[in-house]
Image: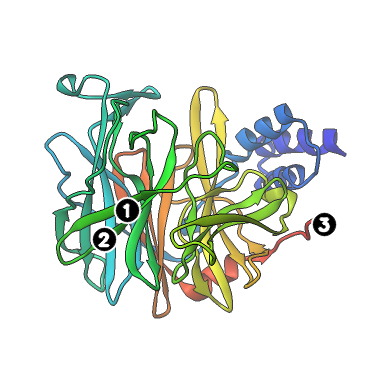
Amino acid sequence: MIEHLAALSVHAFYAGELDAGRRSCERLLSLPGLPQEMDMQTRANRTFYTQPLEELAECRFVRLDVEPAQDGWSAFNPTIADCGGLVAVVRSSNYRIVDGAYVMPAEDGDRIRTQNLLVRLRPDLTVADCRPITGPEYHRTEYPVDGLEDCRLRQTQAGLGVSATVRNAAPLNGDCRIGIADLDVDGAEFTSLRMLDCLSLQQHEKNWMPLQGCDGWVYAVSHAGHTVTVDADPSLAGAYLMHRRSPAPQIASQFRGGSQLVPFRGGWLGLIHEVAHIGHQRVYEHRWVWLDNSLTLRRLSVPFAFRELRTIEFAAGLAITGSSVVASFGVRDAEAWLVDVDAGAVEGMLADAAPADS
């Protein structure tokens, strides 16, 4: 069966049978024990069947045209949250991606620098105001990647803050680690950066998905076959523990964090991304996912692209306002966008996930 599905995943494209090709790729990636080389090839093949979001649901795109933190920098990978009004944090950095390589200004040498922008949004998603965020102050090593990268806004009982990737907080020397900081919206300031670490973490940690309103994250929708969370340790203030939750289906084995998880239809709605490689080019595809209150992955959409097919798009924010679902995402580490989709249309894109082997 594997050989038949693999052949179909290629030939269906040339026969114009796009639905058949798309289904064959999904079936292959749902099979346990698929050889790594075939897994990677299937993901590359699938990008030729991936649909833009606007083909799957009526939606409205709004570009966040904000001034970068410094002249010549970019603004991208926004995160968004509803805090009595929509607020976004937009990453601004000094590099460009040219032929897959990071290119920095000559005066910065090989150092990647990031500063974040605080954006207040009007109800129609246009920008009301934008200010650079100061802070946080922290002891830095000489590792040449500076600042809080790819923030996720997180609401907890203690207030509003972010979790982000940090690479040069002492004593780190380049490993990606998750840091959390408080955000003063009125003052546009990050304070109280704390780095999270424990023996069970991997070499690099990125893209944890905050559970909005809770002091915790979904570490991975599927990690070693299970949903894994990072939860506050009730026995020790400021400490966190990793918990293995329910089994996850095989199709989720390469799901990576994107947005926060927000309450939706009696469970949790989020956006994840998957990575494909076409030659030396990386491609990110996204899916809506829905987890029940036990954080079991129950429903998911087909993969889709936001604005551009077969490129890097990266969703880091999600908010529900009235009957709308608003997602925030970056394109090519160079643009910041929002998309507004009717909540009923998002629900209609979700299909039951295959049950996981326990």
For the C terminus, the image quarter is bottom right
Q: Nearer the viewer, residue 225 or 271?
A: 225
Please state which of the two labelled residues, at mark 1 or mark 3, is closer to the viewer: 3
Q: Nearer the viewer, residue 12 or 165?
A: 165
| Percent of width and height locating residue 273 | 53, 47
SS at badge 2: strand
| Percent of width and height locating residue 59 | 41, 64
Residue at horizontal 74 percent and vertical 44 percent from the top: 24
| Percent of width and height locating residue 183 | 26, 60
Along the horizontal axis of the image, is 64 left or right of 297? left
The residue beneath circle 2 is 183
What's under tag 1, amino acid-wise? Trp
| Disc 2 residue crowd, few under 14, some 14–19, many 20+, Cα 10 Å | many
- Mark 1 or mark 3: whose residue is earlier in sequence: 1
Q: Specify the farthest residue to the left.
A: 71
Residue at horizontal 58 percent and vertical 61 percent from the top: 289
| Disc 1 residue crowd, few under 14, some 14–19, many 20+, Cα 10 Å | many
Q: Residue 337 carries which label?
A: 1
Q: Nearer the viewer, residue 3 or 177?
A: 177
What's under tag 3, amino acid-wise? Ser
SS at badge 3: loop
Cα–Cα span, label 2 and label 1: 22 Å
Residue at horizontal 44 percent and vertical 32 percent from the top: 175
Can the viewer see residue 145 in this picture? yes
Q: Toward which corner of the image does residue 353 lie, by quadrant?
A: bottom right
The residue beneath circle 3 is 358
Residue at horizontal 59 percent and vertical 70 percent from the top: 348
